[in-house]
Amino acid sequence: MTLYIFRRLLATLPVMVVVTVFVFFLLRLAPGDPAAIIAGEDATDVVIAAVRAKLGLDRPVLEQFALWVWGLLHGDFGTSIFSNLPVSRLIAQRIEPTLALSLATLVVAVSLAVPIGVLAAWKAHRLVDRAVMVFAVMGFALPGFLVGYVLIWVFAVKLGWLPVQGYRPIAEGFWPFAQGLVLPAVTLGITYMALIARITRASMLEVLSQDYIRTANSKGLATTRVLLLHALKNAAVPIVTVIGIGVALLISGVVITETVFNIPGLGRLTVDAVLKRDYPIVQGLIIVFALVKVVVNLLVDISYAFLDPRIRY
């Protein structure tokens, strides 16, 4: 097991190297000059050159890359071009809302989608199963911003049960904190729930057709025990896989959801940084998102070894 985990850890290093190179040079090859944007529309060439020198953009690209990577290795993501604050501080200030929203979405999606998928597989080709499949199709088809605005109109504007927008830190009280997360978490989790429910159903259907399930049923074991202890346990690998893949949906969905609900998280910071062409912030955020994705994939790979010991070898 230790050797398996060590091999998976080594496999993450080339991924992060490729991401680092891609992020740096992709932004540098994008059209537009951040020095000219900072200097303003009426700036002269001399002023633009001075700004470029201050930012280090007048150096060779490879030298800029080497200095940036050296800073990353020391925990330095650089300094924001516009706010002149360390990128690490800006990320730290915005990470709580995004982390809270992502964890709430995971809890809501997984706790609802897995039982729904199991129920659909158990009642295959019946009304419950058809309802789950309709939900899965609609979950993929409906845009996140549309779902968000509909939920705001119904539960915040018409019924007044929940706040329209904004985020309350948990330090201000758990109930205000939870109220502000309900609508964003449901909005972000609908697509995620549809994906997990559909894969859970498909994986369970395959397992329920196996001989050992028929044997368990013939022994007179309770249906709940057969479904949870025998079927779901053996169908867990594809389900865990899609949960890990869904983290990419969360990362992309956070940007839209935080904008709709006016949540001051990493998604809003990403949008603002892209519009201003603030290279250090964009680079730092992409590295953070990529690292989260790599770590989640690593945890998923490790979980395979516990769910199915054959994978270790």
Image (cartoon, rainbow, N blue to C red):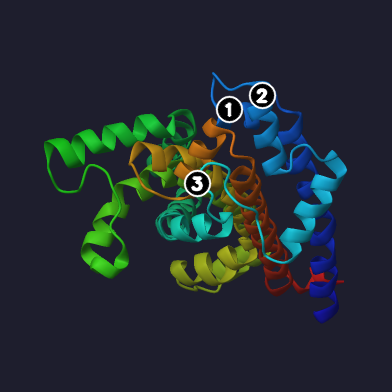
Q: Is residue 300 left or right of residue 144?
A: right
Q: Nearer the viewer, mark 2 or mark 3?
A: 3
Q: Nearer the viewer, mark 1 or mark 2?
A: 1
Image quarter of residue 175: bottom left
Amino acid of disc 1: Ile
Q: Position of residue 55 (x, y in %)?
A: 68, 42
Q: Nearer the viewer, residue 192 or 46?
A: 46
Helix, strand or loop at label 3? It is loop
- Confirm whether residue 18 shows in the render: no
Q: Position of residue 226 (x, y in %)?
A: 52, 68
Q: Are marks 1 and 2 in contact (CB under 8 Å)?
A: yes
Helix, strand or loop at label 2? It is loop
Residue, disc 3: 83
Q: Residues within 10 Å of mark 3 (few under 14, many from 20)?
A: few
Q: Residues within 10 Å of mark 2 (few under 14, many from 20)?
A: few
Q: Is residue 81 left or right of residue 135?
A: right
Residue, disc 2: 32
Q: Position of residue 146 (x, y in %)?
A: 36, 29
Amino acid of disc 3: Ser
Q: Position of residue 5 (x, y in %)?
A: 79, 73
Measure the alpha-carbon separation of dots 1 and 2. Answer: 8 Å
View extreme (bottom): residue: 2
Q: Nearer the viewer, residue 45 or 15?
A: 45
View extreme (top): residue: 42
